[in-house]
Amino acid sequence: MRIELPYGRGKRVLDIADARVRGVLRSHIEEYEPGATEQELIERALSNPVGSAPLCELARGKRRVTIIASDHTRPVPSRLLMPALLREVRRGNPHADITILIATGCHRSTTSEEIRAKFGEELASRERIVIHDCDDPALLTLLGTLPSGGECRVNRIAAEADLLISEGFIEPHFFAGYSGGRKSVLPGVASRESVLANHCAEFIADPLSHAGSLEGNPIHRDMVWAARKAGLKFILNVVLNGEKRVIHAVAGDMLLAHEQGCRFLDAHCGQDAAPAEIVVTTNGGYPLDQNIYQAVKGMTAAEATVKPGGVIIMLAESADGHGGKAFCREMTASDDLNALAKGILRRGRNETMPDQWQAQIFIRVMQKARVVYISEAEDALVRSLHMYPAHSLEEALALADGLIGRKDAPVTVIPDGVSVTVRADAAS
């Protein structure tokens, strides 16, 4: 069997005997044909909102309207979504005072060049656009206490709007269940402290905080609470294929429309686990495999199907190295993974450190299975992060066989670990 695996801007090919392959877990999103253009899908969603009146009706009589937009780190097709939202608001209220609020979360500020690329020159120059800053107290207002126990502070422009709307896209998220919907408020336009409280060690450790999980997920619960408290009334969310083209769109109630979009996605990217002692996966290639920090996301798909004590072979080019100083400090503070995990878990909900959630999940993965890491990163860095470096699939498989202690151990392959939601029940 020859299986192509994305790696950087290219591919690596896994040659493996058929008899060893326990399963190949792929998303079926690429096979889906929507039968309509991107614009038609968006218009259809706006014309048939889920659990809500049409946006033009909601806009009537609302003076201050805020539309939360994704930032430069997300592939949301704002050039398509934002004009449609603006049109519908103005159709219901031509005199609405509209602000587009860029949801940077805790990311860096979006540049003017990125704004123009995202919205187009005409829209970017015509509309009022404000960039969220999670560290500026003058921009933030207190809404109450999150279920996590942390203070819920969000951008005033969102909280004080007469009508709050958001755009977004839905994909599997490795601890929030899915992206999109309520995430536009928390973490999108929340304070850093609120984000850290939501990403606390206790919640990351919860067994329901994983990809594809919404019901009972404490991180999702916090996010829904914040979005409701901020008054998020209407969303327009899309599902994208590998070429970042819209293949499905939902609009309407913040919770009901989002859940409908999640169900669509799960029907096309959800896969039952195929338990095996060795699991080969990737982070989907460039741009998501630029560093080790991001590669943790793809590893969680393998975690859901690898047998305890097994080996995960992770392919991620990692030309930028570790991807975060705080993350690297957390991971290299001790040679003992159990000690690292206990140290993070001792931190209270309001003592969360930046990027500790990524380290916590990474440690959890390696407590279940050893990780052989194929990359362009320095071997010393890979070893310092408790992994085994390799530079080819042949080398990695030989290393995995040695760690397992046999050459015929079953192998499950997940060609793109960030596009698949692996249902782990069969592996537990």
Image (cartoon, rainbow, N blue to C red):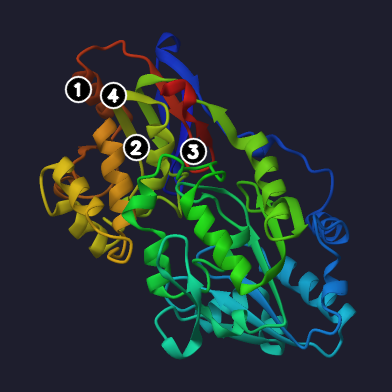
| Mark 2 in CB contact with mark 4 (< 8 angstroms) | no
As shown in the figure, which amino acid type bears the numbered disc 2? Answer: Met
Q: Secondary structure at mark 4?
A: strand
**Of the image marks 1 and 4, the number of the one nearer the N terminus:** 4
* Residue 374 percent location from the top left of the image: 29, 39
Q: Residue at x 19, y 14 (%)?
A: 405
Nearest the eye: 39 or 334: 334
Distance of label 2 from label 1 (alpha carbons): 15 Å
Q: Which mark is residue 314?
A: 2
State which mark lies toward you, 4 or 3: 4
For the point 56% across and 84% down, the residue is 156
Residue 309's tag is none
Give the alpha-carbon distance from disc 3 to disc 2, as whole Å.
Answer: 10 Å
Q: Is residue 140 above or below residue 354?
A: below
Question: Residue 35: where, in percent of width, then height?
Answer: 84, 43
| Circle 3: residue type | Asp
Instruction: Report, in whole angstroms, how far the alpha carbon at label 1 lies from the one at label 4.
Output: 8 Å
Regarding mark 3 in the picture, which secondary structure is present there? loop
**First in sequence: mark 4 or mark 3?**
4
Sequence order check, earlier mark of 2 and 1: 2
Question: Which is nearer the N-term, disc 3 or disc 2?
Answer: 2
Residue 136 position (above or below residue 174): below
Residue 310's disc is 4
Residue 416 image label: 3
Which residue is rendered at x = 45% and y = 16% of the image? 22
Count neighbours of disc 3 (C-alpha within 10 A) and say few if under 14, some if 14 to 19, many if 20 or more: many
The disc labelled 4 sits on which kind of residue? Gly
